Amino acid sequence: MIYIRLSLIEWASNYSNNEHKIISSRHTIVQITTLVGVAISGSLITYLSHLGIDLREFIVTLACLMGLLMFWPQGVSVTFESNTKFKIFSKDSVLIKVAISSLLLGFLVSLYEPLIPVFIKNVIPQLGLVSIYTTICGVLTVLGSLWMTRERITSNSVYFLSFFALPLGVTFIVSTRFSYIYKYLITIVMFSLLYPAYFQLRDVYEYDLIQNLHIPKPMIVAVSQTSLMFGDSAGTPISSWVFEKRGYDPLIIYYGIFSICIAVVFFIMWRNTFQKTVKPNIKN
């Protein structure tokens, strides 16, 4: 993932007219390929099962195919210049802000996104319908991802990321006033549409930081991805425990409060940095 992001940063810097679109398109492509891959793998597993083929051979074959990543296009350097000096733990270091932001965003997404099939099953017990509605959520995520690539949004990434997190949190809290089914419907649909912003706009503002502050690309990408993974691994166990012990209402209330807090903290933390380095480009 780090190498892929570095490659996209390198390509984007060579195509300045579409740099934000290139950076923000990564998550869109991931969502589309995930949808297609799940459909293909599910069909293959069902077909191979009917043929009596051992699925272990199929899994080993897929694992071997991952070796194709070794042939990723070359040309992106991941080395540091010998005279590079950047204090990671200095008081006003941008890298600390990057780490905290990625940690919080990873935690925010993992609190809800992995449990969407469970939430759907809680309303619709039929397994076949659960699969269909989960796929629909994936389509909504793709549509949301495509919308997030608009120039007006990507050119003001920090502001729009905070803006999306704020109404999402408010919607989660207010939805507890609705009936059982509508409560699930509103929160799942809103989350599926808006959560791509957390990944796409994060990639964009980190790219802007690299371009304007001249931070070494491997350093900022490595710190960001590592922090995101820590946050991503912590959210789901907590939300699973809350959902199992307390139910859906407390979970979405906690999520809503946390989302609003992150929106405020994120805006305050990055506002001054981007006012000094990356001027907003709001177009009519």
Image: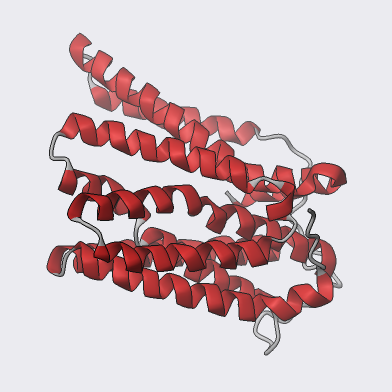
Colouring used for the render: secondary structure
**Residue at 66% in and 35% down:** 72
Residue toward you, 165 or 54: 165
Q: Residue 123: x percent and y percent? A: 17, 46
Which residue is situated farthest in the top direction here? 51
Which residue is situated farthest in the bottom direction here? 91
Q: Residue 119: x percent and y percent? A: 23, 50
Q: In this view, does 228 lie above or below 45?
A: below
Q: Residue 178: x percent and y percent? A: 25, 59
Q: In which quarter of the image is residue 247?
A: bottom left
Observer able to see residue 140 = yes
Residue toward you, 69 or 246: 246
**Residue at 47% in and 43% down:** 141
Residue toward you, 85 or 123: 123
**Residue at 73% in and 58% down:** 207
Q: In which quarter of the image is residue 199?
A: bottom right
Observer able to see residue 216 = no
